[in-house]
Amino acid sequence: MNTTIAILGRPNVGKSTLFNRLLGQRKSIVAPIEGVTRDRIYAKVEWLDKEFNLIDTGGYLPKSENLIDKKVKLQSEIASEQADILMLVVDGRSEITSSDRALAKMIKITGKPCLLVINKVDNPENEINTFDFYELGINKQVCISAHNGRQIGILLDEISLLLPKVVKKNINEKSISFAIIGMPNVGKSSLMNTLINENKSIVTNIAGTTRDSIDSYLTYFKNSIRIIDTAGLRKKSKIDDSLEFYSNVRTLRVIDECDIAAVLIDINKGFNNQDKNIIRYVIDQGKGLIIVVNKWDLVSKQTNTMKDIKEDMIYEYPYLKHYPIIFISVKEKFRINDVLKNVLEISNKNKNKIKTSELNTLLEKVIKYYPPPAVKGKEIKLNYITQVSQSPVVFNIFVNHPTLIPIQYTRYLDNQLRTELDLKGLPIKISFKKK
């Protein structure tokens, strides 16, 4: 898992401006990510061939002036629970405040690597006024202007020096990494514990490398499955909405690490926008996906209840027709092993590279049934298809006019490839290349 850096600081020192400035370095950005319910709070950044995750506390923290102590407490929790490296941002045009001192003290208590980022220093002449910030006891300091981009490259170089060298993972690389994700209180921990107890074949428990999370290993039909623990997704706190913040950041990190994700949905709470956002992110990251609807035992059932609910979900989010939707009850242990069955099926599909000859026979068939329409008076010819990636599944189709393919025809090809090749549960990408 990538190193995570948290941007800390009192209100109005430029935390979110710095976050956006780092994302604005075109060559550095891998993938900015929208928070599930709020502004952007999390992003993956690349600099000098190194990657790190960035957390912005500025987009989350409440605005009220009488909540300074709570803000400091929340940032302390974020730093201790989620981050590996800390960046304390201060205002270089103002004096040190009690909040600056409190945050600096908290950072030193954590013992984690840190940088003091003195913001709003628009020119070299103003740096002479920043020596007082050594009082905070953080030796590594960088003067920047997030607003105009001054010395952002130097800041990124300093961050790069703090990042660990890439080391080979010690975990069993043959294991399938499987994450159970979803909103708080939908039954994630209960499902994980039930799966482990039902299979009674735990190989080992291994402490996570960044946050002391516990990953459990079990064997299912001679396949090793690593279940990434999200039991700590809900961090107890008296601060409003902090659970939501932890849930969002932790979930995004877990998705990045897994091969296949099961999005757990509480049938009593319904299929909401936050569920859809999590699903969308899983798909965008190219991960295998299973939709698991829990608490089936609490539903008043008729003959077609399950079918009707599934159709309603697909109506709200049509792309779900490409992914398995299963109904379970963790409490009653109803269809629990269907989850692992689907994990295994998706994993096996992901391992199989489709023969180019088979793909081109299929392409010829789908074109014959429905040829691509002419666009702007130009005839479109699809010449050749090949699979260039397995995880995620990516197909390159060579065509005479790649920029003229209508979106409707792309969807047609997507549907045909999924149906004919049995790719249910896997996100796929079609890339059109010039012949």
Image (cartoon, rainbow, N blue to C red):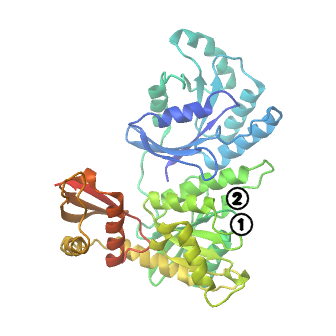
Q: Which residue is mark 2?
A: 234
Q: Dividing the picture into quarters, in which one does residue 419 lie?
A: bottom left
In the displayed structure, does residue 18 sit left or right of residue 348? right
User: 229 or 119: which is nearer to us?
Assistant: 119
Q: Residue at x 69, y 78 (%)?
A: 295
Q: Earlier in the sequence, mark 1 or mark 2?
A: 1
Amino acid found under the numbered disc labelled 2: Arg
| Position above or below: 100 against 343 | above
**Rendered location of residue 384, percent (x, y):** 18, 64
Local packing at callout 1 (Cα closer than 10 Å; few below 14, some 14-19, many 20+) is few
Q: Tell me the residue that label 1 is attached to.
A: 185
Element under disc 2: loop
Name the residue furthest right: 66
Q: Which residue is pictured at 67% across the width and 32% down the height?
A: 9
**Farthest residue toward the bottom?**
303
Which of 172/366 is in front?
A: 366
Q: CA distance from mark 1 to mark 2?
A: 9 Å
Residue 145 placement, left or right of 286: right
* Image marks 1 and 2: residues in contact by CB distance under 8 Å: yes
The image position of residue 171, as x and y in percent, is 46, 64
